[in-house]
Image (tube, rainbow, N blue to C red):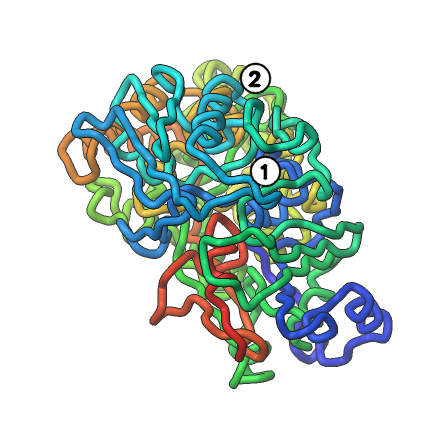
C-alpha cells in the first residue's frame, strides 16, 4: 500500500530535529522494552476520534481499531478455513445457511470490567441491521431481531449466508444502545459520531489512554483475559508527516513494526541489521484503478468514464508489468485476470484467467478500439467524444475531450509512482489523463464522498471471492458507505451477490454466480485490476519475537486489520 521513499544512504544521517522528535514522542527504545511502536499510515492527521464505525476516525485510518475492539472469531487471512476462538468460542451455521449461532467466550469482558455478554453482541447486530452508518462490515439485514439466550447469540437471515460466515465472525464488537454496564458517553450510536480516547470502552487488550497530535499511546486493558498477560504492555503510534521521517525511525530501530513497501528493502533495511531486520510480503488482495462512473465526479463533465468501453480501453492500455517492476519494486505482481480474483483463486477464474496483456495495448490497438466506439482524436491529439454512440454512452456532448485525473496520496509513494506511470502510459495512447497527489486525509475523505475521477486502491482480499466482489460491487447504501466508492450501481451484480453469499464455495451454484460477477467486472469495468497487492509487513526482532513469518503463517502479518492484537499478544521478549 505505502512505500518509503528514502534510501539507506539518505536515512543513516538522522537530523537533530528528527532525533529530538523521536525521543519526545516515545520511540520504542525510550519507552521501555515492553512498549511496542508501530507505524501504519504516514501523513494522516491525528484527531481525537476512536469510533470504530467511523471511516474517517483516527483509529480507522491508522488501522488500530483492532487493538481495542475484537472480532468474535479470529480468521486467518493467509489460510483458508483457518480460525481461532476469540470473543466467541464457536460459530455454527444451520444446514440451510440461514441461522448462525455464536457461543460467547466466558473470559470476554469490557475494559471497564463488565462482562461481555451474548446480549451485547445481539444488540450490535440489531443496531447494524437498523442503522446503515454502523454497518461498516457490509452485512445483510437480519430477517428478524438477533436474539440471545445464556451465552449464545442467534442471527437469522432470509437467505443463506454460506459465503458470509467469515464476515459475520469477523465483525468487531463495540458498545451500542441498550448495552448494560456501559456508560452513555462510551456508546456508539452512529458511524458519523466522534468518540474521544477517554470514552473508549472496548473489549481488546489495549485501550487509548493518551492522545496528542503527535503520539497516541495504548496501554494494557487490566481486565483482558482472553490470553495470558501479554508481554507487550503498551503500543505507541507516533505521527509521521513524511516517508523520510518514518524511514529514518525504522532504520534506527525506533519503530518495531511497520506496513510499508521499502525500495530495495534487502539492501537498505535488511542489510542495515541482518540479524534483526526482516520483512514478509505475502500476496493479499487485488489492487485496482477504481473509476468514478458518475458525472458528479470532479471531472464528470469531461472524463468519459461513464462509458464502460472507454474504461476498458484505459484498462487494456495500462502496462502492468511496468507498475510491478518500477512502482512496486517487484513485490506486487501484475494482475492477469479482468475478474479481479487473485492467483490463489485461479480455480474460480474460468475463461477470465490470464486474459490481460500485462504489457498493455499499443496506440494503434487503442485507437482502433475507441474509433469503433465513437471516439476520434481532436486537434491536440487526444480522444474526444465524436459519434452518437459515444455521446449516448458518456452522456457528454460531441467534441468533449476526454480528460480526467488519477488521485492518490503523495505519502503512499508506490501509489504515487503508479499513478504517474499510468497517466504517462495513457498520454502515450492519446488519452488525456493526469496525476493528482493529495494528502492522506484528503484522499480518505474523498473516497467516501466519491470526490475523485480515479484512484489506485487495495481490495478486500480474503480467500473467498465474495469479499472482493462485495467490496467492488455492493450498493454503498447497504454497507455504511464502505463499498463501491465509484458509484457503479448494477442491479444484476447486487442480486448476484445475494446468490453468491447463499452458495457454498466450490458448488456449481457458487461458480455460476462467480462467473456472472467476473463478467460484469470484465465488461462493465468499474475497476481495472492492475496488481496483486502485498500484505506489507516490516519488523525488527531486536525487542520482540513471535512475528508472523512465511514458516509461521498464523495471522495477517502487517500492523492492520482484525489480527493486530492477536499478533501482539503472541510476541515475546527477544
Question: Which mark is first along the chain, 1 or 2?
Answer: 1
Q: Which SS class for mark 1?
A: loop
Asked if residue 29 lies left or right of residue 264, the reply is right
Asked if residue 395 lies left or right of residue 30, the reply is left
* Pointer 1 residue: 52
Give the residue drawn at x 16%, y 29%: 95
Residue 556 vertical placement versus 329 (above, below): above
Give the residue drawn at x 50%, y 37%: 173
Q: State the image coordinates of residue 36 (x, y, percent, origin top left).
A: 62, 66
Q: State the image coordinates of residue 427 (x, y, percent, origin top left).
A: 57, 44
* Pointer 2 residue: 396
Q: Which SS class for mark 2?
A: loop
The quadrant of the image that shows the N terminus is bottom right
Asked if residue 490 lies left or right of residue 267, the reply is left
Give the residue drawn at x 34%, y 33%: 152
Asked if residue 427 lies left or right of residue 125, the reply is right
Q: State the image coordinates of residue 559 (x, y, percent, origin top left).
A: 54, 57
Residue 427 visible in the shown view: no
Residue 175 vertical placement versus 220 (above, below): above
Residue 380 vertical placement versus 27 (above, below): above
Q: State the image coordinates of residue 102 (x, y, percent, origin top left).
A: 33, 36
Amino acid at each position: 500500500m505505502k512505500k518509503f521513499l528514502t534510501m539507506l544512504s539518505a536515512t543513516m544521517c538522522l537530523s537533530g530535529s528528527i532525533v529530538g522528535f523521536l525521543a519526545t514522542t516515545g520511540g520504542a527504545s525510550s519507552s521501555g522494552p515492553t512498549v511496542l511502536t508501530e507505524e501504519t499510515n504516514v501523513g494522516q492527521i491525528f484527531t481525537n476520534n476512536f469510533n470504530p464505525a467511523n471511516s474517517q476516525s483516527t483509529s480507522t485510518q491508522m488501522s488500530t481499531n483492532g487493538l481495542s475492539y475484537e472480532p468474535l472469531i479470529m480468521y486467518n487471512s493467509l489460510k483458508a478455513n483457518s480460525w481461532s476462538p476469540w470473543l466467541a468460542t464457536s460459530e455454527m451455521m444451520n444446514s440451510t445457511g440461514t441461522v448462525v449461532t455464536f457461543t460467547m467466550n466466558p473470559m470476554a469482558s469490557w475494559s471497564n470490567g463488565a462482562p461481555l455478554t451474548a446480549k451485547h453482541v445481539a444488540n450490535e447486530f440489531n443496531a447494524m441491521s437498523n442503522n446503515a452508518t454502523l454497518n461498516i462490515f457490509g452485512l445483510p439485514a437480519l430477517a428478524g431481531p438477533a436474539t440471545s439466550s445464556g451465552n449464545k447469540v442467534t442471527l437469522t437471515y432470509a437467505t443463506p449466508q454460506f459465503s458470509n460466515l467469515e464476515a459475520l465472525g469477523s465483525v468487531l464488537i463495540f458498545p451500542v444502545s441498550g448495552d448494560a454496564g456501559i456508560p452513555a458517553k462510551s456508546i456508539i450510536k452512529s458511524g458519523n459520531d466522534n468518540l474521544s480516547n477517554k470514552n473508549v470502552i472496548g473489549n481488546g487488550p489495549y485501550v487509548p489512554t493518551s492522545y496528542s497530535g503527535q503520539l497516541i499511546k495504548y496501554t494494557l486493558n487490566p481486565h483482558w483475559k482472553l490470553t495470558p498477560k501479554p508481554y507487550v504492555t503498551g503500543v505507541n503510534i507516533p505521527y509521521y508527516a513524511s516517508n523520510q521521517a518514518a524511514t529514518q525511525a525504522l532504520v534506527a530501530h525506533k519503530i518495531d513494526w511497520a506496513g510499508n513497501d521499502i525500495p530495495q528493502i534487502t539492501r537498505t533495511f535488511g542489510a542495515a541489521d541482518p540479524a534483526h531486520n526482516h520483512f514478509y510480503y505475502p500476496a493479499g488482495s487485488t489492487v485496482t484503478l477504481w473509476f468514478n462512473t458518475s458525472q458528479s465526479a470532479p471531472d464528470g463533465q469531461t472524463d468519459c468514464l461513464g462509458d464502460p468501453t472507454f474504461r476498458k480501453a484505459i484498462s487494456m492500455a495500462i502496462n502492468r508489468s511496468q507498475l510491478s517492476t518500477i512502482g512496486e519494486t517487484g513485490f506486487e505482481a501484475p494482475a492477469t485476470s479482468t475478474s479481479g480474483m487473485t492467483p490463489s483463486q485461479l480455480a474460480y477464474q474460468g475463461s477470465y484467467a490470464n486474459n490481460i496483456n500485462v504489457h498493455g495495448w499499443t496506440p494503434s490497438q487503442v485507437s482502433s478500439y475507441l474509433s469503433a466506439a465513437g471516439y476520434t482524436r481532436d486537434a491536440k491529439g487526444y480522444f474526444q467524444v465524436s459519434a452518437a454512440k459515444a455521446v449516448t454512452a458518456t452522456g457528454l456532448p460531441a467534441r468533449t475531450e476526454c480528460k480526467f485525473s488519477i488521485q492518490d496520496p503523495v505519502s503512499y509513494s508506490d501509489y504515487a509512482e503508479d499513478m504517474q506511470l499510468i497517466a504517462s502510459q495513457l498520454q502515450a495512447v492519446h488519452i488525456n489523463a493526469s496525476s493528482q497527489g493529495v494528502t492522506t486525509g484528503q484522499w480518505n475523505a474523498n473516497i467516501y464522498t466519491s470526490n475523485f475521477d480515479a484512484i489506485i486502491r487495495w481490495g478486500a482480499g480474503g480467500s473467498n471471492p465474495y469479499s472482493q466482489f462485495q467490496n467492488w460491487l455492493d450498493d454503498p447504501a447497504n454497507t455504511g458507505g464502505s463499498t463501491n466508492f465509484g458509484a457503479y450501481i448494477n442491479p444484476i451484480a447486487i442480486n448476484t451477490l445475494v446468490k453468491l453469499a447463499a452458495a457454498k464455495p466450490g458448488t456449481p451454484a457458487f461458480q455460476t454466480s462467480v462467473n456472472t460477477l467476473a463478467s460484469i467486472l470484465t465488461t462493465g469495468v468499474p475497476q481495472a485490476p492492475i496488481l496483486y497487492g502485498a500484505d506489507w509487513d516490516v519488523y525488527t526482532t531486536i525487542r520482540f519475537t513471535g512475528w508472523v513469518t512465511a514458516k509461521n503463517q498464523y495471522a495477517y502479518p502487517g500492523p492492520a486489520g482484525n489480527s493486530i492484537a492477536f499478533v501482539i499478544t503472541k510476541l515475546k521478549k527477544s
